[in-house]
Image (cartoon, rainbow, N blue to C red):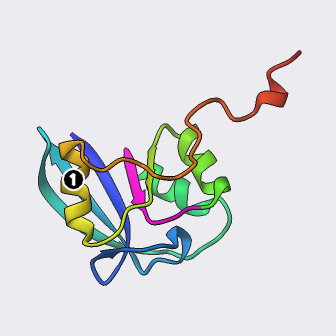
């Protein structure tokens, strides 16, 4: 099973990950949504939300936009980041499950700490 969270306002994908009203969390199995719940945004503190969601077992986060710091923490927690989404939150998840929703952001999935890798 996979958990997909969408940063949303009024059921729509929000532009601003950290400042959304709620996270809509969809449970998916065999590329079908089987359950959804809504979690209120507990508040925007640096580095808090990515861990908050990862601790809840979220595998994928979908948002309109996201800051690099949050992306980095999600990557460290093995949560896939999909940015550049818009429109209805549930539709975005369905498109993701079909493989139609591709990230449009300049999100690096590679190791980001090149300077810490030694010479």
**Image point 21% across, 46% down: which residue?**
97
Q: Is residue 61 magenta?
A: yes
- Visible residue check, residue 11: yes
- The extreme top residue here reads 119
Is residue 6 or residue 83 the one in the foreground?
83
Q: Is residue 91 magenta?
A: no
Is residue 32 or residue 110 the one in the foreground?
110
The N terminus sits in image quarter? top left
**Image point 18% across, 55% down: which residue?**
94
Q: Which residues are magenta?
A: 58-66
- Visible residue check, residue 57: no
Q: Position of residue 2 (x, y in %)?
A: 26, 43
- The extreme right residue here reads 119
- For this view, does 47 lie left or right of residue 93? right
The residue that disc 1 covers is: 95
Q: Position of residue 67 (x, y in %)?
A: 63, 61
**Image point 67% across, 54% down: which residue?**
69
The C terminus sits in image quarter? top right
| Above or below, 112 relative to 69 | above
| Above or below, 53 relative to 115 | below
Identify the secondary structure beneath mark 1. helix
**Residue 5 occupies quadrant:** bottom left
**Number of disc labels:** 1
- The extreme bottom residue here reads 10
Label 1: few (<14), some or many (≥20) within 10 Å?
some
Q: Position of residue 75 (x, y in %)?
A: 55, 40
- For this view, does 83 lie left or right of residue 76? left
Q: Position of residue 105 (x, y in %)?
A: 52, 52
- For this view, does 60 lie left or right of residue 87? right
């Amino acid at each position: 099973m996979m958990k997909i969270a969408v940063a949303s306002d009024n059921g729509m994908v929000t532009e601003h990950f950290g400042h959304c009203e709620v996270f809509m969390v969809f449970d998916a199995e065999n590329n079908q949504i089987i359950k959804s719940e809504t979690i209120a945004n507990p508040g925007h503190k640096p580095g808090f939300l990515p861990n908050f969601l990862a601790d809840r077992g979220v595998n994928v986060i979908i948002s309109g936009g996201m800051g690099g710091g949050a992306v980095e923490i999600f990557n460290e927690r093995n949560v896939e980041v999909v940015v550049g989404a818009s429109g209805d939150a549930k539709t975005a998840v369905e498109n993701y499950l079909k493989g139609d929703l591709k990230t449009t952001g300049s999100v690096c999935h590679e190791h980001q700490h090149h300077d810490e890798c030694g010479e």
